[in-house]
Image: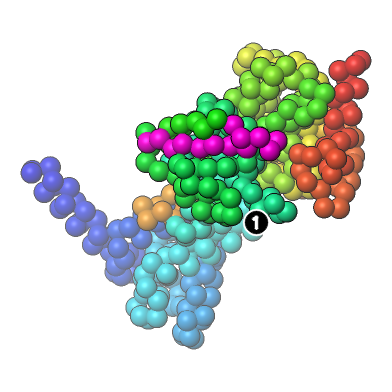
Amino acid sequence: MGLRLLTAALLLCISCVPAAGGQQISAQHLDDLRNGYRALSATFYRGVTSAELVAGARAGLTGALRAAGQTHPLPAPRTRTGGVDQIVDAVAAARHTKTLSETALTYAALDGMARAASDRYTVFMTPKEVQGFEEPLNPPHVFGIGVILQQDEKTKEVTAAYVAPGTPAEVGGIQNGDVFDTIDGTSAHGLDVAHVRALLLGQSGTIVRVRMLRAGTARPEVAIMRAEIHAPTVYQKLLPNGIGYIAVGVFGEPTAEEFGAALRHLQHLNARAFVIDLRNNGGGYVNAAVGIADHFIHSGPIVSIAERSGTTEFDADAAADETHPIAVLVNHYSASASEIAAAALQDAGVATLVGARTYGKGVVQQLTYNLDGSAMKVTTARYLTPRKRVIDGIGLVPDVPVSENDHPRYGDPATDAQLAAAINVVQAKAKG
């Protein structure tokens, strides 16, 4: 009880900390402003001055007040004790207009500070924006069997478009392209994806009985135990002539592990060459890119991260387990971590890049979180390829340029000209 009382007393005192000029704002918003200021002033890779951050915060506050109908200008700073104190003073002064909430004003100041960096990747994010940013990188979990569903446009039958490796669906023998015939005795014919999905979901550890059609023939009904599943970030399949195809949708938290599982699955199927598809992949976590490159690069650097405080080099960990021919598909929307992985494989000479020039996002961001879930996303470094190439604003030039055809179906060589070209590349290597 004594510890609780002490903690409560401290919080009470902190919440009453006077801002500059004798004004007061809450302890949370005081911390939010200090966190944002510290992240920008200490870690922004090009550097931003205190005066610029103060001016940016005041501009953000002025814009927010004007949008809310407040036309009176903010008073001049009442303190000369430092940049963050002047920003706190401005928020406190704006609060007394009673035009916007203290939270809205704090957000406006933080947004203005981020804009002062003049960097399109350095932004302040509200809790909702943080959630939207992180959700693809940390896929939500559901309780089901581990299949991605798709409805055939002609027959309207719901199929298992993709069965993730290691999931209950794979253990139960379901394969890509199988059609759902019955689920717990209920006919799946005529049902849409949402209804089939609802029948497959359920509490972890419970059983769902499914009967599938494969090439029009009914398979025996199987009992599958539901488990906790997350939406996959990696997709794989074996194409004709032993070509392993691995598409990476995003470089998220589970991606490196999923990629390893996909690679092992295709190795087990005796794939003799691989195409890694990074098209339309906007990036994600650097560690995920390093983890993927580690499968193919035996030694040497994978990427270097150059911050204001120095440069950190990520080297291969000598655990490479694949030596077959590799092609990497890229396009203009391959960015950031996609470019890290593609550049590492290109510089190491273990893969041929096929497709179109990449986006050219060669900088790294870090998020500094606030207690309410908002965050300051700051560009803290630029990265260099193993051969010390700078990619930011330039991109990667493919070894085999191929334009995308109209209306491609990614993963289908018959309708995907870039994939067909990549297959030709690895087949030629395999024969050589």
Tell whether 394 sits left or right of 255: right
Q: Quadrant of residue 59?
A: bottom right
Give the answer, above or below, for where 375 lies relative to 310.
Answer: below
Which one is nearer the viewer's eye here, 218 or 403?
218
For label 1, the crowd category at 10 Å Cα-Cα, with few meaning under 14, some 14 to 19 and many 20 or more, is few
The way the protein has been coloured in the rendering is rainbow
Q: Residue furthest left?
A: 1
Q: Is residue 208 visible?
A: yes
Q: Is residue 8 left or right of residue 90?
A: left
Assign a secondary structure to mark 1: loop
**From the viewer's perspective, is residue 268 above or below residue 143?**
above
**Image x and y of residue 387, in percent:** 78, 27
In the image, what residue type sits under mark 1?
Arg
Towards the viewer: 165 or 61: 165
Residue shown at 34% from the left, 65% from the top: 20
Residue at the disc numbered 1: 120
The total number of labels drawn is 1
Q: Main secondary structure of the magenta part?
A: strand
Q: Which residues are magenta?
A: 206-219
User: At 78% across and 46% down in the image, what residue appears?
Assistant: 409
Question: Residue 77, relative to residue 422: is it above or below?
Answer: below
